[in-house]
Amino acid sequence: MCGIFAYTGERNAGEILLDGLTSLEYRGYDSAGIYTPQSGSVKSVGAVSHLRRKMPPGFFGTSGIAHLRWATHGEPTEGNAHPHTDCTGDVWVVHNGIVENHKELRKRLEAAGHTFVSSTDTEVLTHLVEEHLTLLRQGSEGQEPENIFEKAAVAALKEVKGTYGIAIQYKHDPARIIGARMGAPVVLGLGEHENFIASDASPILRHTRQIVFLEDGEVAVITPEGHTITKIGGESVSRAAEQVDWNAEAAQRNGYDHFMLKEIMEEPDAVRNTSRGRIIDTDGLAKLGGLESVAEKLRGIRRVIIVACGTASYAAMAGEYMLEENARIPTEVDIGSEFRYRTPVIDEGTAVIAVSQSGETADTLEAVREGKRRGALTLGIVNTVGSTIARETDAGIYLHAGPEISVASTKAYVSQLTALALLTLFLGRQRGMSVARGKEIAQALRELPGKIEEVLKRSDEIRKVAKKYANTRDFLFMGRKYNLATAFEGALKLKETSYIHAEACGAGEMKHGHLAMIDEKFPTIALAPSDSVYEKNMSNIQEIRTRKGPVIAIATDGDDEIRSTVNDVLYIPETIEMLSPILSVVPLHLFAYHFAKQKGINVDRPRNLAKSVTVE
């Protein structure tokens, strides 16, 4: 998730764009850049403050585009920072999204003589526009075609597969800026003799409250005096502006009360973005470009160790079940902070996989280094491009979940589970997994985002259950097999956001101590989807109910029978057992959020906790 901002009007665009980037900084902080036709381009690695310090005296323009980068293709370097330009320096682009067919486009454009200077997917867009400008001129018999910039930009976008929220500027038509949306948000701000394009309303609201939200497949053109919107196919769109009464901070959260809720609501997109371009349905395969360089080594791996901390370690726990049951690879999970202190047995047939949202988790990083010292193949599953774990591992998988602001990780967790499912499909098909099973997993992965959206629509129902138990001081979370990990994740989210006692256990461990805590004031959240251990879970629920313990069940749609056994039921759609943790955790994330909000706690910033643990 990157931030784009564009301005055209009568005031100094340089200051307006810099201030706007500061409002967007929650969307990315790897690098920043700005372009105005009058003063050119300035880029920097790091936060907007670094860009501001690099701005030369007198930097000016009455229009321009700007960008904050959260890296997805290419490391966070000045060369990879946006805006990007074409061979002529006339076309400039800022982009939020992923160009899935960038390799094919780049190859074709290089063959046509275009020179690339970055390793980003975005740069192909500038050269595509340049190419279509040339083609339009060649067909015009020496006359400059009317609206050539707009025609070239639309023609280029028609060739793009993937997602984009984009702003394009042409040096020879400086007052005109083109914006377009496909799967990534774009809004217009309409002012007096000035107009704006941005990723969301936050940088616009200090200038105007008149906002137009673009829809997928739409192209907007802004000038100081007005705007137009068309479908990418050419049909005109008429849409009135909306009066937005959010403040800038609320706009950063898309109107949600907290980043945690916003990020929970982004979980379908997190799964989409993690799996985008990586599923080959027809053959039941996963295409993981980041593993291509070590694909042959992976064929010979005899054992996998997954190292992670906190939330990521619970994703790893579910991944252990995925890999062993479906890819038939012996797998174990180690907490990063313990791995290097227990003298692990590692050889060249071992792969050490590090799972980390930030890619900077100190204990997980040291586990990777220990694995390398002992001769293991090391892989990373991280969200942050160019992070230390991404750089130091032999290969890996980027999550593409976008920045996560809330300390309590939610969308990164479902993204990690998705990446581990893709890895399972990738390795499983190397090792005897049938085509039929591969297709089943691939299809189920495709369907997951829509099913998560179904759960999110039940947020009010989950809020009511959370309110019912708002005065409770203790919770037990109980799961089995794949959803043992979900129980641990649910307990962690509740205690870190609400500061109450919450613990998790395997359902089969109830009689080994946990049952002693149960009474009418000690509720259990039981993970009981319709899977291979359903009957076992129901037996444990009966044990709790016999001792008068309240039970909230997470169950599969259509399971009406469970209602007669438990106090409350939160339903999830049906999916294959391997992917059930990705669905069953969603109501637990919402439950933790609503529970903490009832208590008036700062949900995004729990006391005593930091987003990334970078020291031991």
Image (cartoon, rainbow, N blue to C red):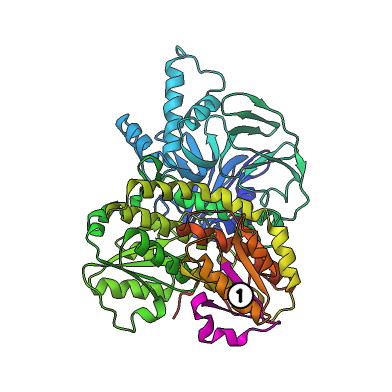
| Rendering quarter of residue 247 | bottom right
At 53% from the left edge and 56% from the top edge, which residue is drawn?
28
Instruction: Identify the element where label 1 is drawn.
Output: helix
- At label 1, the amino acid type is Gln
Furthest-top residue in this view: 141
At 63% from the left edge and 67% from the top edge, which residue is drawn?
553
Residue 481's spot in the image, x, y percent?
46, 68
* Residue extent of the magenta highlight: 500-527
Residue 148's spot in the image, x, y percent?
53, 23
545 lies above or below 417: below
Quadrant (top left, top right, bottom left, bottom right) of the C terminus = bottom left
Residue 526 inside the magenta-drawn segment: yes
At 41% from the left edge and 28% from the top edge, which residue is drawn?
131
Residues 411 and 570: in front is 570
499 lies above or below 217: below
Residue 522's spot in the image, x, y percent?
67, 81
Does residue 490 appear to the left or right of 389 in the view shown?
right
231 lies above or below 358: above
Residue 3 visible (yes or no): no
Residues 210 and 418: in front is 418
**Which residue carries the number 1 mark?**
542
Residue 302 visible (yes or no): yes
| Rendering quarter of residue 282 | top left
* Badge 1: residue crowd in 10 Å (few <14, some 14–19, many ≥20): some
Does residue 122 appear to the left or right of 574 in the view shown?
left
Residues 204 and 70: in front is 70
Residue 582 inside the magenta-drawn segment: no
Count the marks: 1
Residue 344's spot in the image, x, y percent?
29, 79
